[in-house]
Amino acid sequence: MRLVVTYRQGGFMNEKVKSGSRNVAIVGPYLSGKTTLLESLLFVTGAISRKGSVKDGNTVGDSANESRDRHMSVEVSAASTEYNDLRFNFLDCPGSVEFAQETYNALMGVDAAIVVCEPIRDRVLTLAPLFKFLDDWEIPHIVFVNKMDRANIHVLETLHALKAVSSRPLVAHQYPIMQGEQLTGFIDMVSEQAYQYHPGAPADLIPFPENLKEEEHTARAEMLEALANFDDHLLEELLEDIEPPQEEILKDLKMELGADLVVPVFFGVAEQDYGVRPLLEALVREAPEPETTAERRLTKASNSPIAQVLKTFYTPQGGKLSLVRVWQGKLTDGIVLNGVRAGGLYRLMGQQQQSVNEVLAGDIVAVSRLEGIKTGDILSPDAQLKADLPKAEQLEPVYALAITPEKRNDEVKLSSAITKLLEEDPSLNWEQHGDTHEVILWGQGEIHLQVALDRLRRKYNLPMTTHMPQVPYKETIRKPVAAVHGRYKHQSGGHGQFGDVFLDIQPLPRGEGFNFRETIVGGVVPRQYIPGVEMGVREFLAHGPLGFPVVDVAVTLTNGSYHNVDSSEQAFKQAARLAMQTGVPQAQPTLLEPILKVQVTTPSEFTSKALQLLSGKRGQILGYEGRNDWQGWDNISAYLPQAEMHDFIVELRSLTLGVGSFHWEYDHLQEVPEKLAERVLQSNTNGHANGNGNGNSK
Ligand SMILES: Nc1nc2c(ncn2[C@@H]2O[C@H](COP(=O)(O)OP(=O)(O)OP(=O)(O)O)[C@@H](O)[C@H]2O)c(=O)[nH]1
């Protein structure tokens, strides 16, 4: 096939069949250098002829406008290159916890991940949730300690800190050669050969640095011991002081990395391309082949083509692209998947696309126009297909904003635009609240929602204003009132309107809602008018004297009278409303607020801070304990008023290096403390209803 060059910096690879492929996600904490590493990988493999930088906004990763604006990845970027006759599909994933869903979805489709991190002791904890995800799903991963041009802690200290947050043993695959804080070369721990880096060129073989002999030997012995834990033959050799052959070490590294039993560690400086070639070599030699990954992940009952959607994009022109991993068989141009004809197959290089005619199992490509298909869906031309592939759990939303189109006429466009937004980003959610009628956008944090709002504005021409969502307060009554009278009598022209009722109004236990009964005897209120009475009561309760829906109240129609000509269901409805208007204010109305049951997850060292945060937000601690499935992490259970939830995730993250998280569900309604209730009611009469009494726009 002929070379089609469409990429500005050097072009796509020749679209010819390679001897194999590797699909690799680049993951790691925020700003650790993932996009820079991708740029370097593409550069050293010749896919681009000039490197862009994150600062200049011209990298292949971070190509979306929303990423460029913020100098951070906000979605997965795919790029393809080749090295050693293998096709490499790299997925550059966002590091911010607010975009973790993107990363988790992408990880489900790769053969291995490169975890990029920085040599900063205090920041390694930010790796813990990612390591846990990788280990829970047994995804083979390599650590690349980046920014070794400013490493102010010793290599062994970095390794030690990293080991503390990984449940799998970390093995140094290289021993870095440093000059002060600057990486200058490395010793390959398999061959024990030393190399020196050179700007813009491959590393040179150099004599073994004698001063590192002892440290390197210790680190190598640790690596071999870790490998020997899963290989009896290697263990015997070590016990008998036999130097294991290099092939055996490499075989073990491949097998144990592939099964996520060990995590090899590399060091580098992505900005200078240092450490990037050895990383590629390791991926070629040691990362699992796509067929091996398919054997581990795919459960299937037929041989038809099978693919899975890892990410959905809507291009600025409005076209839909589904990034898919082909697990089995081949996809061809125009193939029908799950009943939908694909528009075309494309290899991606950031935002650039190159059309291809067919794609074989083990590859990752974008498929256009798969309308109705969502991220995570398993695709096949076989309608009866029974296949299973793991799918990352959907993250629960933890942060909300109420949104309103800047232009009133845009309200009708909003729902279809949000539907597309949610297809692109499954960790968003939205609802139109039943009580407050606000449209609420839910997501993972402030930046996450701002990115969603940017997309609404840019892609769908829907600028929005936002404000803090109102708290859906309710009200109830504290004491019963009996025989409240309501009489509706109206004479206008023809025949008049007459309804007359006596109601008992009583509080119900919390959570009982509403019930209506009648104890009418002797037909003083004829049967056919009683539904009107209930309707009038319900209508009144939708908006009580404090301005909120009234709950946990029982109303009994006990007595009344009627007029043969003038009575009607409508008139009795009005009479009931009048009785309620009189009676409810006498029954000590009181404000109720929704209380959430939350479960906070935090590293144990931050548990006391998280407890303080909860208490400071009127939370009621129910208990806390260490997690059985996650050493060094605690779960805290508490009740938290919904009025205090708005910034809870923001504050929790700022107290816990960004790794604290929480799960929540509505639990019950509870009386608002008197002082606070006054503030809420005051701000409600001013047109706002949130717990802090400040309904300001954000
Ligand atoms: N000193 C130094 N800086 C680096 C290196 N690699 C990346 N950086 C800088 O680190 C910053 C973040 O780099 P990115 O590549 O955007 O990091 P990222 O991990 O992709 O960021 P997110 O995807 O937003 O989490 C940028 O300013 C880079 O220039 C490196 O090897 N050395």
Image: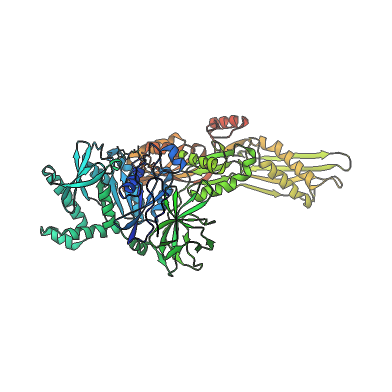
Task: Farthest residue to the bottom: give it.
Answer: 302
Task: Farthest residue to the front: give it.
Answer: 2
Q: Residue 402, percent across and down?
A: 55, 39
Q: Is residue 630 visible?
A: no
Quadrant of the rendered image holding ligand 1 = top left
Pick whichever, 183 or 442, lies toward us.
183
Q: For residue 40, which quarter of the picture?
A: top left
Q: Residue 422, percent across and down?
A: 52, 49
Q: Quadrant of the N terminus?
A: bottom left
Q: Residue 10, percent across and down?
A: 37, 47
Pick whichever, 513 or 261, lies toward us.
261
Residue at x 25% of width, y 50% of height = 278
Q: Is residue 318 left or right of residue 73?
A: right
Q: Is residue 209 left or right of residue 293?
A: left
Q: For residue 560, which quarter of the picture?
A: top right
Pick whichever, 312 or 30, lies toward us.
312
Q: Is residue 547 visible?
A: yes
Q: Residue 201, percent across and down?
A: 24, 45
User: From what the image shows, is residue 411 above or below residue 138?
Assistant: above
